[in-house]
Amino acid sequence: MVELDNLIQQLRTKDPYWNKCHPCKNKGKCCIGANPSFSDKEWQDVIEYLDEIPKDDYDKLLENFKHNKLCPFRTESKCLIHKVRPFNCKYTPFQAVYRNDGKIIYSMTTDDCNFKTVVSEPNMNFNSTENFIELNNFLEKRSYLLINNWVISNNLLEEPEKKATELLNSYFAK
């Protein structure tokens, strides 16, 4: 995760626009509707962290889980596991993904964190081995983190991931 944190910091230096995300002024708006998945290691970190959260937060997690909320860790104002969130939450909203069909998927974002998912063709100078890519973000260009290389270099494609609801089923069954 340290490498991902470093890449995000490099992105924020390369394109100061992304500094608006640190600290978040929109209560994690980019995470609304997310359905995070966890590796075994990430899930173990979450389980250990859940022992430390305040009772009110734990009760909110249980309530969200019972109501089948897509991400039970998300409240109206925060992420209950922000400190130990999985990598797929860490790279939101900075990521662009180069798909097998040769297209790039990413989210354009406004200053108040409204998002629009876009699928586009890469430009002629596109290099899939780079860490960053410039893409249209409404009326201007923005740099994004091209996440494919980081995922591949960390062997994350081979690591099975499970969705939060699946993992919480077994956690709360204890």
Image (spheres, helix red, strand yellow):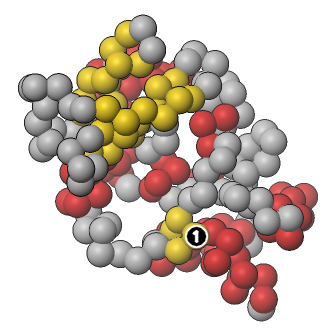
Residue drawn 24% across the image and 32% down it = 121
Helix, strand or loop at label 1? It is: strand
Residue drawn 23% across the image and 54% down it = 100
Image quadrant holding the C terminus, namely bottom right
**Residue 27 appears at what percent x and percent y?**
71, 34
- In the picture as drawn, the residue positioned furthest to the top comes out as 139
Image quadrant holding the N terminus, namely bottom left
**Residue 4 appears at what percent x and percent y?**
34, 48
Vertical placement of residue 136 versus 97, above or below: above
Q: Which quarter of the figure has residue 154? A: bottom left
Vertical placement of residue 167 versus 133, above or below: below
- Give the left or right position of residue 29, taking residue 67 as reference: left
Q: Name the residue under label 1.
A: 163
Vertical placement of residue 100 versus 92, above or below: below
- In the picture as drawn, the residue positioned furthest to the bottom comes out as 174
Residue drawn 45% across the image and 56% down it = 87
Asked whether residue 22 appears in the rendered view, the answer is no
Q: Which of 43 and 167 is in front in this view?
A: 167
Asked whether residue 59 appears in the rendered view, the answer is yes
Residue drawn 86% across the image and 64% down it = 67
**Residue 171 appears at what percent x and percent y?**
71, 82
* Number of residue marks: 1
Answer few, some or many: residues within 10 Å of disc 1's Cα (few below 14, many 20 plus, some between 14 and 19). some
- Give the left or right position of residue 9, taking residue 51 as reference: left
**Residue 94 appears at what percent x and percent y?**
42, 35
- The three-letter code of the residue at mark 1 reads Lys
Q: Nearer the viewer, residue 159 or 68?
A: 68
